[in-house]
Image (cartoon, rainbow, N blue to C red):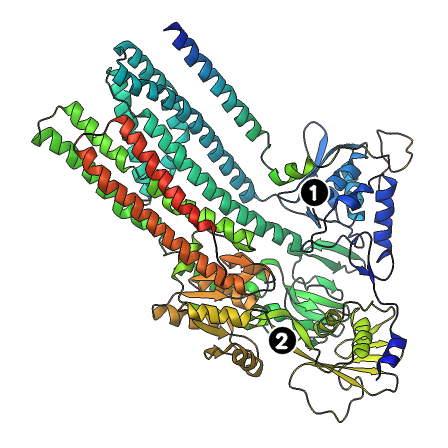
Amino acid sequence: MTVMLVLIGVSLLAGGIGLTTFLWSLGNGQYEDLEGCANRILFDDITPAPTAPEPSQADPPPA
Amino acid sequence: MTAAVAAAFVPAAATSTCVHCGLPSSGRFCCPGCAAAYATIGRLGLGEYYRRRVLDPAARALRPDAPVPRDWAARVHATPDGVHELQVAVDGLQCGACVWLIESVLGSEPGLVTGRVNMTTRRLKLRWRGDAALAARWVGLVEALGYRLVPFQVDRLAAERSAASRRLVRALAVAGFAAGNVMLMSIATWAGLVQGMGPATRALMHWLSALIALPAIAYAGMPFFTSAVTALRRRRTNMDVPISIGILIVTATSAAETFGGGVHTYFDSAVTLIFFLLVGRVLDQRARYHARDTAEQLLILRAADVTLLLPDGTRTVRAQDAVVPGDRLLVGMGERIGADGVIERGRTSIDASLITGESLPVDAGEGDAVNAGSINLGQPIVVRAERAGDQTVLVDCVRLIDAAEASRNRFVLLADRVARRYAPTVHLTALLTFLGWYFAAGASLHQSLLIASAVLIITCPCALALAVPVVQVITAGALFRRGILLKAPAALERLAQADTVVFDKTGTLTEPSLHLDTDGVDPGALSLAASLAASSRHPLARALAAADRTAAALDDVEETPGQGLRWRDVRLGSRSFCDVTDAPPSDGPELWLRAGDSPQVRFRFAEALRPDARATVDGLRARGLRVLMLSGDRPDSVRRIAGLLGIDDWRAGCSPTAKIAVLDELAKAGRFALMVGDGLNDSPSLAAAHVSMSPASAADLSQTLADIVFQGRSLAPVATAVIAARRAGGIVRENLALSLGYNLLAVPVAICGFVTPWLAAAAMSSSSLLVITNSLRARATRSA
């Protein structure tokens, strides 16, 4: 009997975690660009060299 | 003129393509803009881009335009924590590499917090700290790469749509969670019935089920409950009414059973039912929203800016909808006129084909009226706006459209027609079952209620509610992959009924542009003429340039509006412009080329039919549809096209009102008309027809009103869509027959009181699966 109660508790907990995670990811906008995400994985993130040597990194000159 | 003479005139032909934008070019780059973009990308170490990208011929080419001075700062949205935000639509995305390029270039900017491209919606979201005016810098960076950025209003309706779709997916997630867990308990209970489960354990299972199911039903069932209440308030009924009543009664009975320590509960059926129904609904909504977003994106990218001439002589760029009567608009060569008005200065030729359906441009000078949406083909002109924005020439169209749409709204969807009959029948059956058991068979109140709710569960129109949307979603998806955009899935039903096709001529049966008759044309002369023509926007010049794509554009070509082009001593234009005196008249549009003192060469043009127009018309006829042609163009050109296509039923010189009158006659004769058209003059008839289609080259308004938009040069999508719609209609009828047939078998069993919860669950799932499996057949669409 106790085993069953534990199992039910565990299964509900696991399901609940899954549900919460899904609702969080939905609210977070994780499903808004499925096409882009599929492509993004093919490219490495690189930080290119700055456009020009700038005196202050925090304050780019106006265009 | 001989080929040798011509060759002497022709500059280096374009043998290569531009390294950056991929357009034909005589050198490594087609323009300084592309060279600069290439240099920038190389300097940032992003040269990898050119190896990884795949150019999309359908997308805008990556050639940087002259920057448009726009007030970006006004579009910036400031958040309370000091971060500025700007969303813009990106035109020219070719593939995933472009996303990477834009984000990497923006990533090198220290001030920017986020610069992220959404490839699905083709929008760029920028967030940064600091001055709002920095927006112009970010936009400039991306535009220098060759993309075009277009501001847009975040539409309230679009925001509501995305909120609605999230609500539905959340409901689906909750229903899925509950269905899985309740089923876990239910299977234990069913096993317990055979293996001997103690009443205490069973009660625990029922209580746990109730604990999960009740809140889940209250939350996930909301979409159905609200829709049912709305329908009932309007004294109507839809599929959601029997669904809601079924769910509520079953839930109430099960709850009563649980609290009373009964043996059978139906929580699993109720929750699974909601889950299945939500799956259908989410799919349906996805398909509809996807179509609408795609159409909206097209409109955003096309929204043109106009150049205003201010009283003090300076110029400013404004959004088209900000123009007011009295404004003076400067319209450059090849630009669309932004408002209805009168030409104040300049003489030019105007292409009004999208508005009147006339295929040839007309000359216009000072004092002539021009309509919004026409294209200025010649010299820059100044137009004084008389009606702008919502009041342009479209006023009349819009009035006709409103009237036409009101009449079409009377169409009732098949699913709702079925629901109207189905709901009362089901509820009556359940009631009779209850009365029968209670009074005639003398069963207890409790048992009679249980049996009556079993009838409701068995008849709950799960399969019936899936029968239509699943087929529509699958068919819409299959058509979308073939370049046919179904804007309202319900249009499939109307399309399946169509028995008459009404075509517009210009731009629908014929290609949007004219076509050069190359018979007996000297290639050298053609090459020279094409080099001159490449710099003009006149439709004839463009057709000529299109006939020889290898010819590179010449510099210093002068254009005399309505007359022709001149480069050194070479002239290309009308017969008087080229001093032709004695040539026999031509039966269509023509251009003459005169190089120095050599004899003049004639180029003839004709409207070219879409490549498979004849086959499509024949195919539609073979399927029993009557084909008509209504055109606003002159009778002789309409007669010629009608002859080529073998259409006997045609009318020329039709005004929008005349077109509607024909459609009305057809409707009165009991025929269902499919209208296929592209021009603004067609838009009222597109709204009036039973169902309508429009090519993607059509006027914005026409695309907005048409039920279906198709892409590409081919006309075959018309036949493909009709066939797919008829096939979908057949599968829907099979589905309805399947689910009704299942009810006929299962209902007697339920009425007799033999249905237990596990039997109900099995029957419900199997009928739903059967319907879904049958619907999958709609994936195979065939062409004509």
* Residue under disc 2 on the same chain as residue under disc 1: yes
Amino acid type shown at disc 2: Glu
- Chain-order first, disc 2 or disc 1: 1
Looking at the rendered structure, the secondary structure element under dot 1 is: helix
Image quadrant in which the N terminus of chain B is located? bottom right
For mark 2, does the 10 Å Cα neighbourhood hold few (<14), some (14 to 19), or many (20 or more) residues?
A: many
Q: Label 2: which residue? A: B607
Looking at the rendered structure, the secondary structure element under dot 2 is: strand
In the displayed structure image, the side of residue B479 where residue B339 appears, left or right: right
Q: Position of residue B334 (x, y in %)?
A: 73, 65
In the displayed structure image, the side of residue B343 where residue B27 appears, left or right: right
Which residue sits at x=27%, y=29%?
B759
Chain letter for mark 1, please.
B
Check the image and name the residue furthest to the bottom: B582
Number of the label disc, if any, that sits on residue B96: 1
- Decide which of B319, B676 is in the foreground and name it: B676
